[in-house]
Amino acid sequence: MSDSGPRPKSVKAKTIAGTRPSRVPKDQAVPGVADGAPALPDYLSGDHVAAGTWARLAPDLYAKGVLTPWDVDLFAGYCLAVSVHSRAVKEWAADDFATLARNSRGYSSKHPVLQILRDSSAAIASIGREFGLSPQARENLSVKSPPGPTHGGDDRVTRLVGL
């Protein structure tokens, strides 16, 4: 049975929204600060698609404060789901994107790779949402601001707007 209704707001979101202090937990656990972006887990090193996904996204997610040492295994799961999805698409392409396949008894049935694609797509969407990897998720994600001016290097705009 799944939880119904909207997801609970994070402590940061409650604070920004002006929620009464009595409703905001004061003792939230926070991950420690790492010296740099978390390293690629050993179990991903043999999978070039998962390792490539890690190399492409991890540095930026770390810089934005979204990927922490606590999130390494969850993000590794995202990278593995991308890899499984990639392999499934290649296998499906080898079968000319057929939606039906013959089973061992000779009957036509849904191509097995379609279920793999469906499951991996769901995992990518679900885990990716946690890291702000969709347009909707980015709207609800609070990230660290990059250092320095945010308007093309013009501090006058920053002073004028009051940021």
Image (tube, rainbow, N blue to C red):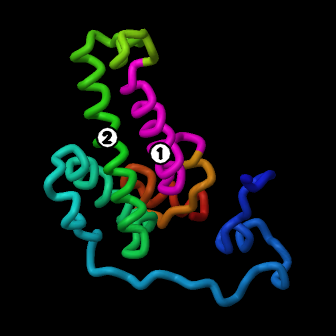
Residue farthest along the bottom direction in this orientation: 27
Q: Position of residue 69 (x, y in %)?
A: 37, 75
The residue depicted at 16 percent of the width and 47 percent of the height is 48
Query: Which corner quadrant holds the C terminus?
Result: bottom right
Q: Which of the 4 image quarters holds residue 76?
A: bottom left
Give the amino acid at mark 2.
Answer: Val
Q: Position of residue 2 (x, y in %)?
A: 72, 53
Q: Residues within 10 Å of mark 1 (few under 14, many from 20)?
A: some
Q: Is residue 115 magenta?
A: yes
Residue 152 vs residue 54: left or right? right
The residue depicted at 59 percent of the width and 42 percent of the height is 136
Tell how many labels.
2
Residue farthest along the front direction in this orientation: 105
Q: Quick one: 108 or 82, which is closer to the camera?
A: 108
Q: Position of residue 101 (x, y in %)?
A: 36, 13
Q: Is residue 84 magenta?
A: no
Q: Is residue 54 visible?
A: yes
- Asked which secondary structure carries label 1, the reply is helix
Q: Quick one: 4 or 29, which is closer to the camera?
A: 4
Gap in Å between the C-alphas at discs 1 and 2?
A: 10 Å
Q: Which residue is mark 2?
A: 84
Q: Is residue 69 above or below residue 117?
A: below
Q: Quick one: 40 or 9, which is closer to the camera?
A: 40
Q: Residues within 10 Å of mark 2 (few under 14, many from 20)?
A: many
Q: Which residue is mark 1?
A: 123
Most common SS among magenta residues: helix
Instruction: Look at the image and give the residue range highlighted in magenta.
Output: 111-136
- Asked which secondary structure carries label 2, the reply is helix
- Cβ–Cβ below 8 Å for labels 1 and 2? yes
The answer to which of marks 1 and 2 sits earlier in the sequence is 2
